[in-house]
Image (tube, rainbow, N blue to C red):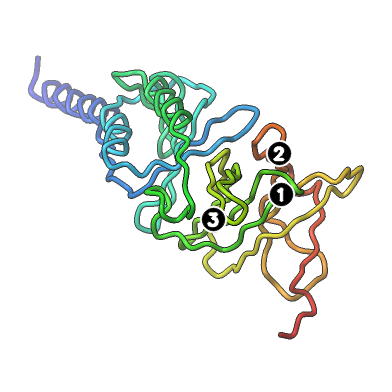
Amino acid sequence: MNTILKIEIGLLIVIALTFLNSCNANHKVNHPDKLYLISLGKQNDTLIIADTQEISKIMSFLNQGERSTSKFRFKYRIEYKLDTLYNKIGVNGNRFKFNRKTYISNENFEEHLDQIVQKKETEKEIYRDITELDAYIGFKLQSGQVLSNSDKALTYIQKDSINVLILEQIIRTDASKANFSILDTVVFINKDAATEIALTSCKLTENHKNELIFSFIKNENTDSYATILKSWIISVSKNVFQKIESKKVTCYNEHYGYDG
């Protein structure tokens, strides 16, 4: 074997090893303060995870995966903000998609997320002020209201670009005081810092039947019809938010024509 051929073979081996190394877990992920765990089914239920140990465990899955070319449908989606970047991770079984690349974990990622969801469902913490719960420390209360003469309430809290709607069970202790527990939550992240948003009640454009519909809209003084960013129907019988296409909804801009 001549010298030139040996050199060429050596270069090919180096290139191959470099490629294999790039396919492994070289995608080390830093830890955010909060994760948003979204169950992708008929309802897009959202859990906010603020416990440091839980976040570390979840992020450890991301740091141990190896590259894969398989395609799959997500059961869960994890969203978080780190510095100024928004990140999304899709999960099914031991497979996950991160930064447009697919990986296979050594453990079953989905089973761990199932356990988190089950644990959260059994915790049902009772509170007076939602912003005193660990998951919502630092959030500011924007609005709150009782829904349609029911024993349910809607609370809107916000922190930086994160907007959270909380469907609550009202727990009466006496005639003048009430406690609450969380029934369901949804999260809207305003990715455009220059856009001021507001929460408003809306209705179906066609065949509306007094549904409870709330939307985040652009807070602008340009038109009587609002620019809708995201909408949900609230079911007080099923205790859930149900996502609805904004194009099916009409919202009036309550700030239009208001001169203060």
Tell me if mark 3 has few (under 14), some (14-19) or many (20+) residues whose alpha carbon lies within 10 angstroms of its own.
many
What numbered label is drawn on residue 147? 1
| Dot 1 amino acid type | Leu
Task: Identify the residue at image location x=62%, y=58%.
Answer: 144
Mark 3 or 1 closer to N-term? 1
Mark 2 or 1 closer to N-term? 1
Q: Relative to 86, say whether 116 is above or below.
A: above
| Dot 3 amino acid type | Asn
Task: Identify the residue at image location x=68%, y=32%.
Answer: 238
Question: Which residue is under mark 3?
Answer: 163
Question: Which residue is under mark 2?
Answer: 236
Instruction: For marks 2 and 1, give the CA distance.
Output: 8 Å
Where residue 10 sits: x, y (%)? 13, 24
Task: Identify the residue at image location x=69%, y=45%.
Answer: 232
Secondary structure at badge 3 equals: strand
**Is the Cβ of the residue at disc 2 closer than 8 Å to that at disc 1?**
yes
Secondary structure at badge 2 equals: loop
**Nearest the camera: 99 or 107?**
107
Instruction: For marks 2 and 3, give the CA distance.
Output: 21 Å
Q: Nearer the viewer, mark 3 or mark 1?
A: 1
Where residue 237 sits: x, y (%)? 72, 33
**Nearest the camera: 94 or 136?**
136
